[in-house]
């Protein structure tokens, strides 16, 4: 019996010594030191498929949406695009812009001899306002307009009590060349000025000098197309940045899309 008790005491002594060591799994200090080296838990991303991005801050991370070819383009213009979607978009662009117009033996099933470049494409943005037509800078005695080159313009009335209409020196037809007379279109934009006072304004040789506010629809006439266009910046001696300028057919404001061609996989 004495030998049996002595054996049990030895076993407890061995385990106690093992647990008191600093480099063994049962040591609290050892476990604490290992936990310090563990990576922080990354929360599960929600919503669309997302990729993790580096923030440059230790322990920090960001996320970026991955483009979903089954969803709306306008709502994910800055999303990452996977290789398959990118390949399909590039092929769509090639098919839209390079069209064969001459084949061997005039047989479309044979090799192409001559391609037509930049043919018309059906994948057009619904936005009919071409902001690139606004010059880089237009300055008059009392006003100034600057094309920022990023899809926005800066407009300013420079003199207190001066003319608050800022000239683009372009007609509506030049700024929106695809507008069709006797059809209804709606204007929309964002502004850092007072929305109710920021207007697209017609001055000139038409009988009715008309104003076009964001969210307002108009039936376009030939006279309107020939009208010289101005912007307002919330009255005199004020300035504003105006962005996301869009003219679309119909009476409902659509999500903003830049002017021009859109090359996307089918179904978008």
Image: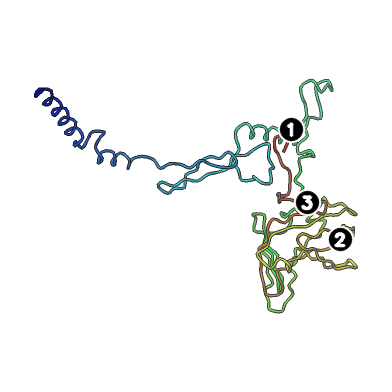
Is disc 2 in contact with disc 1, using a CB cutoff of under 8 Å?
Answer: no
**Circle 3 sits on which residue?**
128
Rendering quarter of residue 14: top left
Query: Vertical placement of 159 versus 54: above or below?
Result: below
Rendering quarter of residue 142: bottom right
**Circle 2 sits on which residue?**
224
**Circle 1 sits on which residue?**
95
Image disc number at residue 192: none
In the rendered structure, which disc, 3 or 1, sits on the residue that comes first in sequence?
1
Dot 2: element: helix
Q: Farthest residue in the bottom direction?
A: 161
In the rendered structure, which disc, 2 or 3, sits on the residue that comes first in sequence?
3
Residue drawn at the location 69% of the way across and 68% of the way down: 194
Is disc 3 in contact with disc 1, using a CB cutoff of under 8 Å?
Answer: no
Rendering quarter of residue 27: top left
Q: Quadrant of the C terminus?
A: top right
| Cα separation between marks 2 and 3 | 15 Å
Coordinates of residue 183 in the picture (x, y in percent) = 88, 53
Coordinates of residue 15 in the picture (x, y in percent) = 19, 31
| Cα separation between marks 2 and 1 | 36 Å
Number of residues whose C-alpha sits closer than 10 Å to that of mark 3, classed few (under 14), some (14–19) or many (20 or more):
many
Residue drawn at the location 83% of the way across and 21% of the way down: 107
Dot 1: element: helix
In the rendered structure, which disc, 2 or 1, sits on the residue that comes first in sequence?
1
Residue drawn at the location 67% of the way across and 67% of the way down: 193
Dot 3: element: loop
Q: Quadrant of the N terminus?
A: top left
| Cα separation between marks 3 and 1 | 23 Å
Coordinates of residue 120 in the picture (x, y in percent) = 80, 39
Left or right of 151? Residue 177 is right
Number of residues whose C-alpha sits closer than 10 Å to that of mark 1, classed few (under 14), some (14–19) or many (20 or more):
some
Left or right of 51? Residue 260 is right
């Amino acid at each position: 019996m004495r030998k049996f008790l002595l054996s049990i005491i030895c076993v407890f002594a061995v385990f106690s010594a093992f647990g008191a060591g600093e480099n063994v799994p049962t040591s609290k200090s050892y476990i604490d030191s290992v936990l310090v080296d563990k990576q922080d838990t990354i929360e599960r991303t929600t919503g669309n498929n997302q990729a993790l991005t580096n923030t440059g801050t230790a322990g920090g991370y960001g996320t970026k949406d991955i483009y979903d070819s089954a969803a709306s383009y306008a709502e994910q213009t800055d999303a990452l695009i996977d290789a398959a979607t990118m390949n399909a978009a590039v092929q769509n662009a090639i098919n839209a812009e390079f069209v064969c117009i001459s084949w061997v033996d005039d047989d479309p099933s044979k090799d192409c001899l001559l391609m037509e470049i930049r043919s018309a494409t059906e994948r057009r943005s619904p936005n009919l306002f071409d902001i690139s037509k606004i010059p880089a800078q237009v300055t008059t005695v009392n006003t100034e307009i600057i094309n920022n080159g990023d899809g926005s313009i800066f407009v300013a009335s420079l003199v207190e009590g001066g003319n608050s209409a800022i000239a683009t020196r372009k007609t509506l037809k030049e700024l929106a060349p695809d507008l069709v007379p006797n059809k209804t279109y709606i204007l929309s934009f964002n502004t850092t000025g007072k929305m109710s006072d920021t207007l697209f304004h017609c001055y000139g040789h038409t009988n009715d000098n008309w104003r076009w506010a964001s969210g307002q629809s108009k039936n376009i006439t030939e006279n309107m197309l020939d009208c010289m266009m101005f912007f307002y910046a919330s009255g005199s001696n004020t300035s504003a940045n105006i962005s996301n300028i869009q003219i679309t057919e119909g009476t409902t404001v659509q999500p903003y899309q830049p002017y021009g061609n859109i090359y996307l996989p089918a179904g978008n």
